Amino acid sequence: MNQWRWWVQASRPKTLVLSFFPTACGIAWAWHDGVVIPVRAGITLVCAVLLQVLANYVNELGDYVRGADTPERL
């Protein structure tokens, strides 16, 4: 398996909606109230998803260190 594919799989793309939708709902609520700043909203959305990816990578590393996962698992 090539390295790029491993990084994508380790980010667990199916879980990224768990950070995207709550953040998007908060932005939509702020938009409805007329207090959203589009640039900040975009940065917030990107940061929320990237933090989810980081958490997934840390979890993968922890599983590997404990021996719960091996490189062959992916």
Image (cartoon, rainbow, N blue to C red):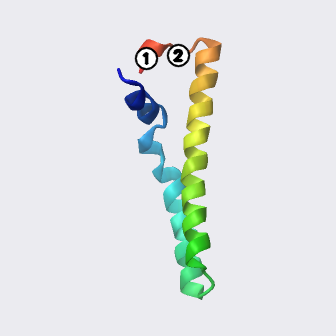
For residue 69, the mark is: 2
Place of residue 71 in the rendered image (x, y in percent of width and height, measured from the top left): 47, 15
Q: Quadrant of the N terminus?
A: top left
* Residue found at the very far bottom of the displayed protein: 34
Q: Name the spot of residue 10 as percent of width and height, x first.
A: 48, 31
| Location of residue 27 (image quadrant) | bottom right
Q: In which image quadrant can residue 30 be found?
A: bottom right
User: On the picture, is 52 further left or further right than 2?
Assistant: right
- Which residue shows up at 41% across the image and 21% down it? 74
Residue closest to the far left? 1
For label 2, the SS is loop
Q: Would you place residue 40 above or below residue 16 in this image?
A: below
Q: How far is the residue under mark 1 from the one under mark 2? A: 6 Å
Relative to 40, residue 9 above or below:
above
Q: Residue furthest front?
A: 3
The residue labelled by disc 1 is 73
Q: Is residue 69 left or right of residue 66?
A: left
Residue 71 vertical placement versus 32 (above, below): above
Asked if the residue under mark 2 is in contact with the one under mark 1, i.e. CB atoms within 8 Å, the reply is yes
